[in-house]
Structure formats: structure tokens, C-alpha cells
Image (cartoon, grey):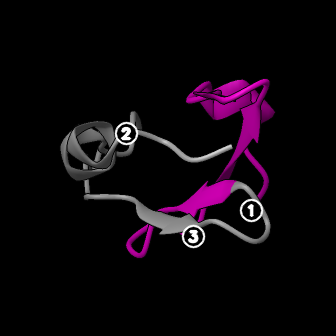
Amino acid sequence: MSLDPLLLEMLACPAEDHAPLQYDADKQTFTCPDCARVYEVRDGLPVLLIDEAVK
């Protein structure tokens, strides 16, 4: 499943840095280059919850 390109441009890390996220289509994850949190994509939706992110 592919994500909308407009959505990919708009997403930012919900942590204090609010850096643009980098999308990995193969792993279905978003990574913040500043804080190194990794957010999963579940059922085609990015889960941008800080408590569920992996560092």
C-alpha cells in the first residue's frame, strides 16, 4: 500500500523537534532524523504517537 505523496510531505515528528519525517516504504516506517524515533505505519496509517515510537 502506498501513501499519498502530499501526506508524506506534510508529516513531521510529534516530538519537540517537529522535524520532517523520512519514509521507508519497504519497512513501512517513518524516521525522525533529529531524535531518531521510528514510527510504524499500520493498516496504511502512520502511527505518530511518541509513546509507541521506537528509538
Nearest to N terminus: mark 3 or mark 1: 3
Mark 2 Cα shell of 10 Å, populated few (<14), some (14-19), many (≥20): few
Tell which of 6 and 41 is nearer to you.
6
Establish if 26 lies above or below 14: below
Nearest to N terminus: mark 3 or mark 2: 2
Establish if 33 lies above or below 49: below
Q: For the residue marked with disc 3, what is the amino acid? A: Ala
Dot 1 and dot 2 residues touching (CB under 8 Å): no
Mark 3 Cα shell of 10 Å, populated few (<14), some (14-19), many (≥20): some
Task: Specify the farthest residue to the front.
Answer: 1
Instruction: Find residue 23 and report its horizontal and vertical position in percent.
Output: 50, 64
Q: Residue sitting at 30 percent across and 44 percent down?
A: 12
Q: For the residue marked with disc 2, what is the amino acid? A: Asp
Dot 3 and dot 1 residues touching (CB under 8 Å): yes
Instruction: Find residue 50 and report its horizontal and vertical position in percent.
Output: 61, 32
Indicate whether residue 43 is drawn in magenta.
yes
Q: Residue 49 vs residue 32: left or right? A: right
- The disc label shown at residue 36, or none: 3
- SS label for mark 3: loop
Instruction: Find residue 31 and report its horizontal and vertical position in percent.
Output: 55, 64
Q: Residue 21 vs residue 9: left or right? A: right
Name the residue beneath numbered marker 2. Answer: 4
Frontmost of labels 3 and 2 is: 2
Q: Residue 46 vs residue 42: left or right? A: left
Tell which of 5 and 18 is nearer to you.
5
Q: For the residue marked with disc 1, what is the amino acid? A: Lys
Q: Residue sitting at 57 percent across and 70 percent down?
A: 36
**How far is mark 3 from mark 1, CA to CA?**
6 Å
- Residue numbers of the magenta segment: 29-55
Name the residue beneath numbered marker 1. Answer: 55
